[in-house]
Amino acid sequence: MNKQTDKGLHPRNLHNGRYDFPVLIKQDPCLKAYVSENIYGDLSIDFSNPEAVLSLNAALLSYFYDVKKWSIPKNYLCPPIPGRADYIHYMADLLAESNGGVVPKEVKVLDVGVGANCIYPIIGSSIYGWEFVGSDVDDISIKSAKSIVQNNETLNGKIEIQKQENPDNIFTGIIAKKDCFAFTLCNPPFHTSEEEASRGSQRKNRNLTKQKTKNSSLNFGGQANELWCPGGEVAFIRKMITQSVVHRNKVLWFSTLVSKKENLKSIYKALKLVNPQEVKTIEMKQGQKVTRIVAWSFIEKKRASEWFKKHANL
């Protein structure tokens, strides 16, 4: 079920293959200003130009996900859509394993750190019809995500955006007594400081300047809460693991992206302390970039199908 394509993306990912720029330009004419031939004679954009990437994302969301009005505030994270879609598809596979091999439809998902772009809820609700709650600590991100939902009829009623009032909390304050989520997802801040995040961005831009002819899966922009936190990725995920215990019966699968392979050892150690019933590590690849999902559940595998019947209205 988790077989990847030759390009590395999940087989159900709508973004396998090259971008069809003539089609995308027809969908969103604003993209045309950023498209030109590269040295190989192929149409492409300058992936080191944030405005070009933003325009490409708007066209992709319009064409593939029927989201016609999408924008983000200046200098906020502009994510690579193919990689974000992979996370959604692999979690769909994980849910299917507990549902007779069928991806469930009537489920609710929590996106921790939804960001100004609201990408995960857009993809998940558009492809699978899932309902989402997106949480964030940043007021501008909350306002932007709400605006995206309100301005697109296809998203109305499927996505709820909530402010996390206590930045020390991840789940408490968002997961209510009545809530039951099939899974949570998160793209945690992975740098340990603003200085480290700045060095990382500079390094990415240098690499892109050398490889402008190739498509890239890199992010552009990003505010402090999106890119770094004290202790970086490991500290954030360890906190998430510790706090997940409190809500162990309200979530079938907790999950997070892990960008650095060397962080897995510390994350597994933290998971061992809370004694989940099951832990899964799913590797994802897009071009030369490799990342992974770590998911854990406190629900026994044999009880998972019962959980769906009780909480997902299947």
Image: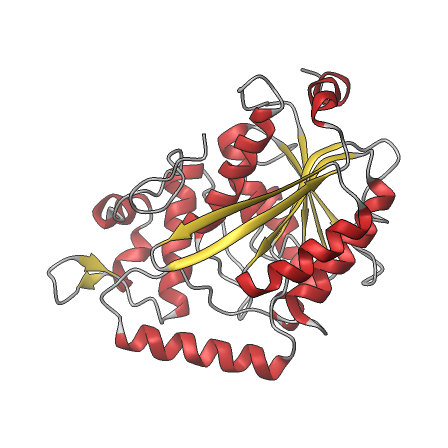
The residue positioned 79% from the left and 44% from the top of the image is: 275
Work out whether residue 43 or residue 183 is closer to the camera in this orientation and state it: 183
* Residue 130 percent across, percent down from the top left: 60, 30
Tally the numbered discs: 0
> Does 205 appear above or below 86?
below
Classify 126 as above or below 7: above
Q: Nearer the viewer, residue 19 or 210?
A: 210
Q: Taking 291 as reference, is 6 left or right?
A: left
**Quarter where residue 37 is shown:** bottom left
Query: How far across and how far down the image is residue 262, in percent?
Result: 56, 65
- Residue visible at 70% across and 26% down? 301
Look at 56% across and 37% down and name the residue there.
91
Residue 69 placed where, x, y %? 49, 47
Q: Is residue 5 left or right of residue 99?
A: left
Up the image or down, 230 lies above or below 98; here it is below
Which quadrant of the rendered structure holds the C terminus? top right
Which quadrant, please, contains the N terminus?
Answer: top left
- Residue 260 visible in image: no
> Is 67 on the left or on the right of 59, as rendered?
right
Q: Which colour assignment does the render follow?
A: secondary structure
x and y, in percent, of residue 44 in the image: 23, 59
Res 19 seen here: yes
